Amino acid sequence: MTSGTKKPTWVIDKERTRRAEAKETVWLFGLHAVRDALVNPAREKLRLVLTKNAYDKLEDAVTLSGIEPEITDPRSFKVPIDEGSVHQGAALEAKPLNWGSLEDVAISGTGAPLVVLLDRVTDPHNVGAVLRSAEVFGARAVIAPRHHSAPETGALAKTASGALERQPYLRVTNLADTMEELRAMGYVLIGLDGEAEMTMDEALAQVGKRAVGLVMGAEGPGLREKTRETCDMIARIPFAGGFGSLNVSNAAAVSLYAASQRLHHDPAT
């Protein structure tokens, strides 16, 4: 090999990551999650394992998907999902969804100009619940760092109750850089912290009807310092008595409701 032809380490690492992502698959399980994935034309489906009872319940979706199911006995339901998972006799191996670029989703995506950013929220049940709330309240995307966040898994999909197939879940290389990109697109970034002086209502009153990014940290550590510094303002959800703060998925639901309502409110009425 002649000098100068050796690839830099960062190039090799990037290519290795790209190859791993190309091979990556996810196992979805449970009747609801599998049904929604089967009828989603954007979902690349690889292998479907069903019991006879589950097939009877999903027959229309299976027919629509065009995938040939493997019918198996409930006692020998062998797929690589966590033992104890409530699969209801249905499991689907598929490719993770590709939602496209941040710019496409944040600027011209469906729904209100509203996104949720999750700072190292690793519990798939919390992320699944946030995705569900984001869909209910019409947000354009839920955004999380590629590392130190909940990946697209069967547990996440089951908690999301179908929202994973319809609500963009973007996993980005660097959350702070993504926040700066959103700001350049016109988004105002509101970080949530139970100790903040400003309430969420006060923050949203300042924002008016501009695009909003709600930034939430993991329970316990909260927002990282760099994430907090990148926010335009920090706000809290007021709570009564000594009950403390809401968990991240409940806080997301409350904040999404408040942020979505201001877009429909007409001060003249």
Image (cartoon, rainbow, N blue to C red):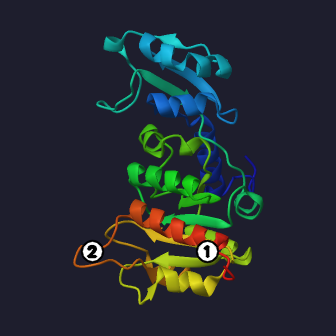
Q: Quadrant of residue 259?
A: bottom right
Neighbour tally class for label 1: few under 14, some 14-19, many 20 plus, Cα within 10 Å: some
Q: Determine the residue positioned at 46% across, 64% down.
A: 252
Task: Give the percent coordinates (x, y) of residue 121.
Answer: 42, 60
Q: Is residue 233 visible?
A: no
- Up-down: is 250 above or below 17? below
Task: Give the percent coordinates (x, y) of residue 100.
Answer: 72, 51
Residue marked by disc 2 = 244
Mark 1 vs mark 2: which is more N-terminal? Answer: 2
Task: Give the percent coordinates (x, y) of residue 132.
Answer: 51, 51
Considering the numbered disc 2 on the image, is that residue within a helix, a strand or a loop? Answer: loop
Q: Determine the residue positioned at 43% across, 75% down.
A: 224
Is 43 left or right of 230, judged from the image as shown? right
Q: Quadrant of residue 136?
A: bottom right
Residue marked by disc 1 = 262
Q: Is residue 210 visible?
A: yes
Looking at this view, is 69 or 93 the one in front?
69
Q: Amino acid at mark 1?
A: Arg
Q: Are marks 1 and 2 in contact (CB under 8 Å)?
A: no
| Quadrant position of the C terminus in the picture | bottom right
What residue occupies the far left of the structure in this picture? 242
Looking at this view, is 109 or 179 the one in front?
109
Neighbour tally class for label 2: few under 14, some 14-19, many 20 plus, Cα within 10 Å: few
Q: Amino acid at mark 2?
A: Gly
Q: Determine the residue positioned at 40% across, 62% down.
A: 250
Task: Give the percent coordinates (x, y) of residue 256.
Answer: 53, 66
